[in-house]
Image (cartoon, helix red, strand yellow):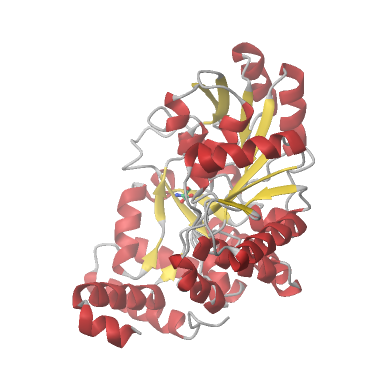
Amino acid sequence: MYEELKNSDYEVYLALNKEFTRESENIELIASENFASKNVLMVQGSILTNKYAEGYPSKRYYGGCEYIDQIENLAIERCKKLFGAKFANVQPHSGSSANMAAIRSLINLGDTILGMSLDAGGHLSHGYKLSFSGKDYKSYSYGVDVNSGFIDYEEVYKIAKEVKPKLIICGASAYPRKISFKKFSEIAKSVGAYLMADIAHIAGLCATGYHENPLPYCDIVTSTTHKTLRGPRGGLIMTNDEEIAKKVNKNVFPGIQGGPLMHVIGAKAVMFKEDLEDSYKEYIHQVILNTKAMCDEFIKLGYKLVSGGSDNHLLLIDVKSSVNMSGKEVEKLLEKVNITLNKNTIPGDTLPPLESSGVRIGSPAMTSRGFKEKEFIEVTRLIDKAIKNKDDEIKLKNIKEEVISLVKAFPMFNR
Ligand code: DSN
């Protein structure tokens, strides 16, 4: 296939080939990325992309949807089984569109929402002023305790009592600790608000029992499918409430989307089946062990971690206090040695987001490649070595060679 592409579209072929080499030869530590299985990639790149199927199984606006219905029903049933949910919509094109449809299913435009602030680890679609969620709704935010790095539930309650939100959103993109959905639900109930959890990052942990399941506590749960779930890029929405489920279906289609991406929904079905297997539970357990191993090693090497450690798949390092570099500088430096991660603001950050005082590091992707604690400890030492030799181009070149030889022993297509 790639040979045909090479002949007909050399520019795309070349960039794709280079990206292939980059992914194979880099240590991927971006906490929201992962390596999808061959079957997920195959179905996502399949003929299902040819089909229009506006509507839902058995209620389509196009003919020829017999097999498409089977595929979407499989995705829905497997998703419900994986999370113990009564209703699931697997059509959202992304996490942000899942959140847009979910919020519209619970409250009216102009109502008040309360979500985690972006600089404390929240997501754009949880009320950030430049996102639809901050423009369409009156948005307030809670953060974390600047000293401990943990969510202060008393503080969340105080803000909620003051701003009286119609909806509270919990869930984060850069929070290394467990989130108590139970505590959030008590707060939401006490102020008469709906509760929505966005588990895009920790979905795999929730599905396998390594994190509290939000479904018993929340009116709506949203997620992406390409992070810890290891599926195609996309979103999903779940609820246990039949009335809310009806609103969700209407708000996804025709509310904010037209035709579903059936090739992606097919790949989601494959992913859910993989995630129901025992080996997936073992994978998530290893993700947590690997993060813990990195935390311990970074602490040993003298780095300051936000909240002092991690309960999940990611950690945040305060690089400004640890090594007097900005997150941007560390990100750029590590790119030189084939280690990919992202700069990230830390609680109380004095630097702007594009500079940042921290970096975020996740273990899901390299755990999929087969890295265990030993390799993650090695990665931690390589990061430290690069930082300590940041001005020595020869040493950095040697570190890059070490990275490539480490990563090459763990091929991308191992499932
Ligand atoms: N961009 C994602 C992340 O990196 O966490 C959130 O959508």
The residue shown at (35%, 66%) is 386
| Residue 121 in the image, given as x and y percentages of width and height | 51, 40
Q: Nearer the viewer, residue 41 or 211?
A: 41
Q: Nearer the viewer, residue 383 or 82?
A: 82
Q: Is residue 256 above or below residue 383?
A: above
| Residue 388 in the image, given as x and y percentages of width and height | 35, 62
Q: Is residue 49 above or below residue 6?
A: above
| Residue 134 in the image, given as x and y percentages of width and height | 45, 26
> Which of the image's four quarters has the C terminus?
bottom right
Task: Answer yes or no: is residue 258 visible.
Answer: yes
Image quadrant where residue 214 sits: top right
Q: Residue furthest top?
A: 162
| Residue 310 in the image, given as x and y percentages of width and height | 62, 51
Q: Is residue 203 above or below residue 100?
A: below
Task: Answer yes or no: is residue 395 visible.
Answer: no
The residue shown at (73%, 36%) is 218
Decide if residue 189 is on the left or right side of residue 5.
right
Decide if residue 395 is on the left or right side of residue 132.
left
> Which of the image's four quarters has the N terminus?
bottom left
Q: Nearer the viewer, residue 74 or 214?
A: 74
The residue shown at (46%, 73%) is 47
Query: What is the tally of numbered marks visible in this picture?
Result: 0
Q: Is residue 310 above or below residue 40?
A: above
Decide if residue 106 is on the left or right side of residue 78.
left
